Amino acid sequence: MEMTDEDLIAFALSLPEAVDSTHFGTRDFRVRGRIYLTLAGPDYCVLKLTPDQQQIALAMGRNYTLAVPGGWGAKGWTRLYHQLADEETVKALVQRAWQNAAPKSMALPGD
């Protein structure tokens, strides 16, 4: 099942202490002030992954992931074409991005 922008936003906001914000005119989602997801383009979002996590995402999702060009991509920021990926994969990647931005003392239920 494809994940729409509305589905993605609802899921991003369902994570603990998630807030809807903006920077440079772009909608983003944060946990304790740190961005974990940005609605960056008309067909994709950008996630805060580590470089290692990014490499795994790129290998597993060649059809729906792409490193952000330049230095941000080298740091792990990754484009996710969420409408092309299955819902389970999108949720797993968004949760990983949230965990990367959240303080280490915070954890998702089940972690």
Image: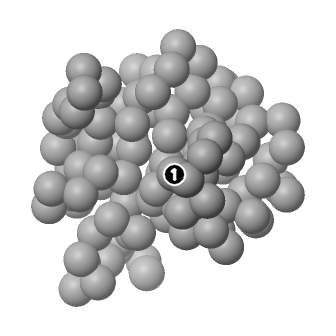
The residue lying at 59 percent from left, 18 percent from top is: 43
The residue lying at 35 percent from left, 73 percent from top is: 109
Direction from residue 84 to residue 70 in the image, left or right: left
Dividing the picture into quadrants, the one containing residue 52 is bottom right
At mark 1, the secondary structure is helix
Looking at the picture, which amino acid does disc 1 mark? Trp
Above/below status of 55 relative to 111:
above
Image position, residue 49 (x, y; %): 53, 61
* Quadrant in which the C terminus is drawn: bottom left
Residue 48 can be seen, yes or no:
yes
Dividing the picture into quadrants, the one containing residue 27 is top left
Give the colouring mode of the picture.
one colour
Residue 93 can be seen, yes or no:
no
Query: What is the number of callouts on the image?
Result: 1
Q: Which is nearer the eye, 79 or 86?
A: 79
Above/below status of 26 relative to 60:
above
Direction from residue 12 to residue 13 in the image, left or right: left
- In the displayed orientation, state which residue is furthest to the top: 42
Q: Around disc 1, counting alpha carbons within 10 Å, would you say few (fewer than 14), some (14 to 19), or many (20 or more)?
A: few
Direction from residue 25 to residue 45 in the image, left or right: right
Image position, residue 101 (x, y; %): 33, 65
Image position, residue 94 (x, y; %): 48, 51
Above/below status of 35 relative to 53:
above
The residue lying at 28 percent from left, 42 percent from top is: 29
The residue that disc 1 covers is: 72
Dividing the picture into quadrants, the one containing residue 79 is top right
- In the displayed orientation, state which residue is furthest to the bottom: 105
The residue lying at 73 percent from left, 27 percent from top is: 84
Q: Which is nearer the eye, 86 or 96?
A: 96
* Quadrant in which the N terminus is drawn: top right
